[in-house]
Amino acid sequence: MAENITVPKGLADVIVDETAIASTDSDGNLIYRGYVAEELAEKSTFEQVAYLIVYGHLPDRGELREFTSFLNSHENVTGTRRIMRLLPKDVLTIDMLRTVVSLVPLAEKDNDRVLLEIAAKMPRIISDGYRLTRGMKPFGKIRGSYAEKFYHLLTGSVDKKDARLFEELLILYMEHEFNASTFALRVTASTLADPRAAVTAALAAIKGPLHGGANAEILGYLLSLKSKEEARKYVDRKLDKKELVMGFGHRIYKAKDPRAQYLKRRLKDLALEKGAGQLYEVAVAIEDEMWEKKNIPANMDFYAAICMYLLGIDGTFNTPIFAASRSFGWAAHYLEQVSGNKLIRPSSRYVGKTGLHV
Ligand code: CMC
């Protein structure tokens, strides 16, 4: 038998494989295929970055046209409306998304096209599923970019400025190397299960509050805090009780999450514009207290949740939005995993009973 290697719990700091999709550079920047993610968020469209993540280079005009047209022509989910109507009225949107993704009829056959087809359908599944389970009519045909349409599907708004901030947020959510949901996807892909199965596994993993589910838990406490003093006391109480403050901490970013800082800058202007200066101040007070007392930085979910709230997005959509954007990262990882596949199957140290007989 081969000699075993013992690694830290949670695989913290363990490199388990190679990837050419995303990483963090020595300055703490998140890098997508060689580009700084924040720069992409500021200067590129969602479609351009999604193409970059999946194919490894920024698209030329023809590639972008073809890619966008593929997404547009595969967004329809009317074939699943019957299933959506059967789901309970109070189903969590992330659970609905996972259930529907596991069943939605797909036109494509090749792995790469299936992965993009699933990604293309996510905004519609989220919106139609949410509305149908609540007895509302789905939105009709919507025109615009991926982000404009998605924003409209979530809020009914056609505000282009708000949709652009939403687009930046989507770009920052798109990819983050071997995070828990992507790793779940890669484990599933390594068994040579099909793309739909692997994405379903990723959707199950992203729901957890230590991962994508965190962005759905932040407003619950944040909106109850009315001043900087209350904010600081809240943090102190949580830390005294050794409880988690959601939206803080990260396995990779121990000093600062660059995505959080990007969105914080955006939030400052957004809060001013929407008359929510106090909310911004409370958020910053929480961040300051967490840093002063425990040296734990705000993560992307913290500022993303507040931005989404001020953009008029219902909190039930927060984790599904993260998932829809990340589905392009998952697509790239599925293809990377199967292209140099080795079954992911670690060992464990047995600490149970021995020597028993019936
Ligand atoms: N609030 C209070 N204490 C915390 C927090 C937090 N949010 N995060 C970490 N700590 C403490 C932790 O209890 C531990 O304390 P001690 O040394 O006294 O035992 C110390 O900080 C080190 O934490 P850790 O558990 O070793 O850190 P980790 O790398 O294993 O965990 C994490 C990372 C994201 C799971 C964790 O920070 C956490 O649970 N955060 C809250 C949930 C959250 O916001 N998740 C979103 C993550 S970012 C987006 C994404 O990838 O999904």
Image (cartoon, grey):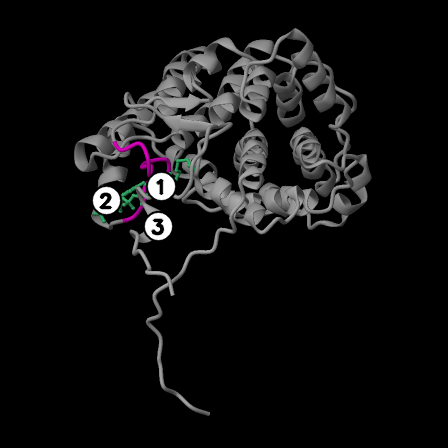
Location of residue 116 (image quadrant): top right
Residue at position x 73%, y 15% in the image: 143
Residue range (magenta): 243-254
Three-letter residue code for mark 2: Leu
Indicate the secondary structure of the residue bearing disc 3. Answer: helix
In the rendered structure, which amino acid carries the disc numbered 3? Answer: Gly
Q: Which residue is mark 3?
A: 10
Front residue of 343 and 39:
343
Tell me, for residue 239, which label it has, or none: 2
Q: Is residue 175 magenta?
A: no
For label 2, count other residues whose C-alpha is less than 10 Å away and answer few (under 14), some (14-19) or many (20+).
some
> Ligand 1 within 8 A of label 1's CB?
no
| 2 or 3: tag closer to the N-terminus | 3
Residue 34 percent coordinates (x, y): 43, 19
The N terminus, quarter of image: bottom left
Left or right of residue 230: residue 210: right
